[in-house]
Amino acid sequence: MRLVKSRQELGRIGLVVLLSIGASVQAARWPNPHIDELESNLYDRRGYNARTLPIGMAPNCDRFLFGPNTGRSNAADWIRAAYHDMATYNIADRSGGLDASIRFESEQTRPENVGDAFKNTLTFITPLVHRHFSLADGLALAMVTAVEICGGPKIPFRGGRVDALKPNSPGVPEPQQTVEEHIASFARQGFSKKEMIGLVACGHSIGGVQHEAFPDVVPPSDDPQNTSGNSKFDSTGTLFDNRIATEYLDGTTTNPLVVGHNSTMNSDLRIFSSDRNVTMRNLANPAAFRSTCSELLARMIDTVPRGVVLTDIIHPIKFKPVGVHLVWVGGGKIALKGEVRVWNSEPSKVVLNWKARDGRHASGNSATLLHDLTHISYPVIPDTPSDLVNRWFSFPETLLNANHGISNFWFDVTNAEGSKKVENLGGAGYNLQDVIMISNTTCLSFTNGTHLDVEFAVRETIKPTRVYTKIDISDDTGRPIIHTIDITPPSDSTAVAGYILWHVTLTQFDHFTLVVDTDLRTFETTFFSANSPFGYSSPMCP
Ligand code: HEM
Ligand SMILES: *[C@@H]1O[C@H](CO)[C@@H](O)[C@H](O)[C@H]1NC(C)=O
Ligand SMILES: *[C@@H]1O[C@H](CO)[C@@H](O)[C@H](O)[C@H]1NC(C)=O
Ligand SMILES: *[C@@H]1O[C@H](CO)[C@@H](O)[C@H](O)[C@H]1NC(C)=O
Ligand SMILES: *[C@@H]1O[C@H](CO)[C@@H](O)[C@H](O)[C@H]1NC(C)=O
Ligand SMILES: *[C@@H]1O[C@H](CO)[C@@H](O)[C@H](O)[C@H]1NC(C)=O
């Protein structure tokens, strides 16, 4: 028996302790708009507040928004788009990879990117982009959402991809190339021959080949429901399963890249048989197929250019205050607004508490019951994993005395069995600044062009050195960048309950925050975003 652990083991224990401290520090950061947005896109899939990507495939993974029902699907286009964007990677200098360079016209029009899948995908995903959500993350997330919702395995997702500023070098494999060329191409992308076979089988589990894009592979069709002549890779074209492998092995495959009439174009046959079918026989086992695809597809989307640092794997946040913000409502009152998402549990009661600015427990009205808004969890497809159930609670009308303000809030949660728990980020509570906030007199005007007449309140005593708004605009490559507009102080600086009202007119207001700098620090409102269900919606001006 060994009593003393080796130095190496002790070192490992030390590392584990450090890592877990790091994890809890990260968990305690709230809000984290970047992680919160990615997490929402990943896990708000159904019912109330469901995000755009999962809805874009509903109900049965066969939704196609860019033409008649041709047998094509958005889901298939998204998987192919993620691969084609990534396939430019060069492991030698770590250039290329998943960086949304496919958005550049000169990359999209290359012969290796034939077809309209990329344009369709970008039309869908580009409107989702803002300062906390890159197009490259959107492409990766669309692939993950498609695979998971269409019956495939869970794929660990990390965020933080950065959109390229220019096209990458060519390098997407094409069906007329030899298997030696394919092996070399995948090696350049960072994948071995065995991994190449796996990745192609995983990718070609969904979708098919169209006559329009590949007239040498698929014959034309005169079926009005099948105008692009889409010929499926396997008998379950919209389902992510291992029939791509089983049908290949049992000789029933209709995969046009295996049994197509033009053998030059039968690249899947050459790839699948390149190791005497050893890998394909392994993939005929459903569990092996799922774990292989999970690992390889995660590596595919995590293949990013040198210098890009990805986040940790994003897990569902079990208890998540969402869209929490303060609104100046006049008369010396501030409304505390927001929602709470509870993941995979059904508490019977959630009580909101808060502390005033001076840290004292706000007297009288510190506890309020939240309403159970909804727990809709209808399935997008019947066999979607059951762990995608969430439940939403809305904040009730909660008015704070502006003289007292707020510094921090937390929740008392009663579970269905009656046990109680405090949700306060491990003791810290959820900090909320009450220095700058939007006013409910903000309104949308259509006179003299469309603009948002933003009114907002700034605390008088903080002595601003600069007050400004940050709005998201695109640079000339389509990347979101932040444009700041300085705001001139109001002529009427009479304070009400310690706050002065400011005003700014915005002609671009899809995504913005209001910011105030002081000598000591910066305060910023929540991110108001038009394409988030948690964004700010304004009434029309009187
Ligand atoms: C040697 C490598 C590969 C070749 C030669 C190849 C070739 C093709 C071709 C010719 C099509 C038909 C496209 C169309 O008609 O619009 C296609 C579709 C597709 N590919 Fe690949 N592919 C390869 C690797 C991959 C990989 C690694 C993935 C993903 C992991 C992937 C995902 C897809 C998907 C999802 C479709 C269906 C698109 C749709 O139905 O609209 N492919 N591929
Ligand atoms: C659509 O047309 C292609 C090309 O002719 C054909 O291979 C495929 O089976 C057709 N799909 C359906 C659902 O009829
Ligand atoms: C087969 O495909 C190749 C590559 O696209 C093309 O050059 C050739 O003409 C095709 N052959 C036939 C018989 O269609
Ligand atoms: C691999 O499988 C295919 C499809 O069943 C078959 O045509 C081919 O002969 C097999 N190759 C080897 C080396 O077993
Ligand atoms: C702002 O909110 C307060 C409190 O709910 C309300 O009395 C007032 O009418 C609102 N003002 C506008 C312009 O909506
Ligand atoms: C109309 O809008 C323009 C630019 O947004 C501005 O320069 C101009 O002063 C506005 N006119 C009126 C009457 O508000």
Image (cartoon, rainbow, N blue to C red):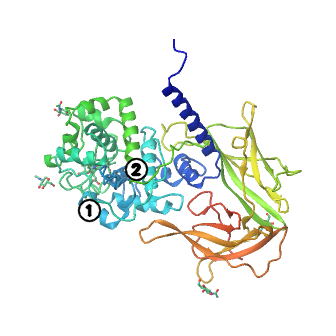
**Residues tagged 2 and 1 counted as in contact (Cβ below 8 A):** no
Q: Which residue reaches farthest right?
A: 364
Mark 2 neighbour density, 10 Å: few (under 14) some (14–19) many (20 or more) = many
Residue 27 shown left or right of residue 90 in the figure:
right
Q: What residue type is labelled 1?
A: Arg
Mark 1 neighbour density, 10 Å: few (under 14) some (14–19) many (20 or more) = few
Which of these two is toward me, 157 or 272?
157
Confirm whether residue 66 shows in the render.
no
Q: In this view, does 518 lie above or below 91?
A: below
Residue 224 shown left or right of residue 439 in the figure:
left
Q: Position of residue 435 (x, y in %)?
A: 74, 64
Q: Does mark 2's beta carbon lie closer than 8 Å to ligand 1?
A: no
Q: Does mark 1's beta carbon lie closer than 8 Å to ligand 1?
A: no
Q: Kindly indicate the quadrant of the structure image that contains residue 103.
A: bottom left
The residue where tag 2 is placed is 75
Among numbered discs 2 and 1, the one appearing first in the sequence: 2
Classify mark 2: helix, strand or loop.
helix
Q: Residue shown at 28%/41% (left/top)? A: 196
The residue where tag 1 is placed is 110
Residue 214 shown left or right of residue 57 in the figure:
left
Q: Which residue reaches farthest top?
A: 1
Q: Where is residue 243 in the image (x, y as percent from the top left)?
A: 32, 35
What's the mark number on residue 23? none
* Front label number (2 vs 1): 1
Residue 93 shown left or right of residue 60 in the figure:
left
Q: Residue shown at 52%/47% (left/top)? A: 42
Q: Position of residue 510 (x, y in %)?
A: 57, 67
Q: Residue shown at 82%/54% (left/top)? A: 356
Which of these two is toward me, 41 or 35?
35
